[in-house]
Amino acid sequence: MSVPTLAAPARGGAHSPVADSYARLAEVFSGLRVTELGHEEQAPQGGGWVTAARLAEGGADLDAFLAWDDAQVLKDYGTRARPDVIASFGLHRYAWPATLLITIPWFLHRRVPRYPVANVSFQRTLGRMAVRPEGFACLPDDPAAALPGARVVPDEEALRAEVRAAVAEHLGPLLDGFGPRMRRRSRALWSVATDEIVEGLWYIAHLLGEERRAMTDLELLLPGATKPYVGTAGFRELSGPNGEALPTRDRASCCMFYTLRPEDTCVTCPRTCDAERITRLSATAAA
């Protein structure tokens, strides 16, 4: 599935331990603006804003959220998708930027913020997220370790465990809300979460010029058997026509795009054979 369409540059709290990470994200990806809310500042309401908590409830706010996906599919492809496919698209368009709230500060500055669902609001058409962190984890040698709200962990593996826990804390309730509409059970839903973590950071790291480091970090983050996640980062390498290395991965889940265009699978889909991947990846590299 393609990268969700979002918009605008980012800003964060002047003294926030994650503000620099979100600013750097905005420099390379203008599609997401992250606003950090102060303690007394109200989360935005109306005008297309919805809290992650309301989406997780699976009620009217989720209905409205998915109605956008339904209309967008009809506009883009001239046909309606099945309700479970629409729900899958909707979850992707939320989870892709939501995981970046956690993985980008970890990747860039080795800081892992916590965001319960009540602390994140999303405006999908403008590409904006408003967040209120509840502390962060960091390493002992981080200057931010002395800041209020810091939880110091002993080493890189402990920090990776914090990333997995922070994403699970945020996405878990959303998987519960979207899951019945997607007609997928727990294991399949957590395989979706695995893909969102990997593909979001992999894409942004490519824009940062740090794709290889991200691949290494993600392989360590998701080596397999890290419940509730399902599968590994899934990276492997193919050889192009001139022997060039073409990084790819196998998704842990299906994005369901094939139900709209059976002949046009994602390049990371297990349905896409290696010969087709080489053709498409080589063309992208040449361009």
Image: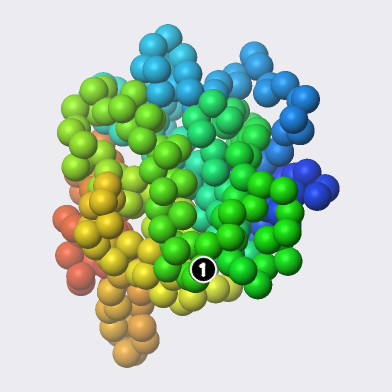
Q: Quadrant of residue 119?
A: top right
Residue 253 drawn at (x, y percent): 23, 48
> Residue lying furthest top in this view?
60
Relative to 36, does residue 271 appear above or below in the rendering? below
Residue 49 drawn at (x, y percent): 60, 21
SS type, badge 1? loop
Say whether residue 41 is visible: yes
| Residue closest to the eye, 181 or 107 | 107
Horizontal arrangement in the rendering, residue 29 relative to residue 86 (left or right) = right
Residue at the location (27% across, 47% down)? 228
Residue 232 drawn at (x, y percent): 27, 62
| Residue closest to the eye, 48 or 168 | 168
Residue at the location (51% across, 68% down)? 154
Residue 247 drawn at (x, y percent): 36, 74
Residue at the location (33% across, 62% down)? 222
Horizontal arrangement in the rendering, residue 197 relative to residue 7 (left or right) = left
Q: Mark 1 points at which residue?
A: 154
Q: Which colour scheme is used?
A: rainbow
Relative to 101, does residue 123 appear above or below in the rendering? above
Horizontal arrangement in the rendering, residue 161 relative to residue 101 (left or right) = left
Residue at the location (33% across, 32% down)? 175
**Amino acid tagged 1:** Pro
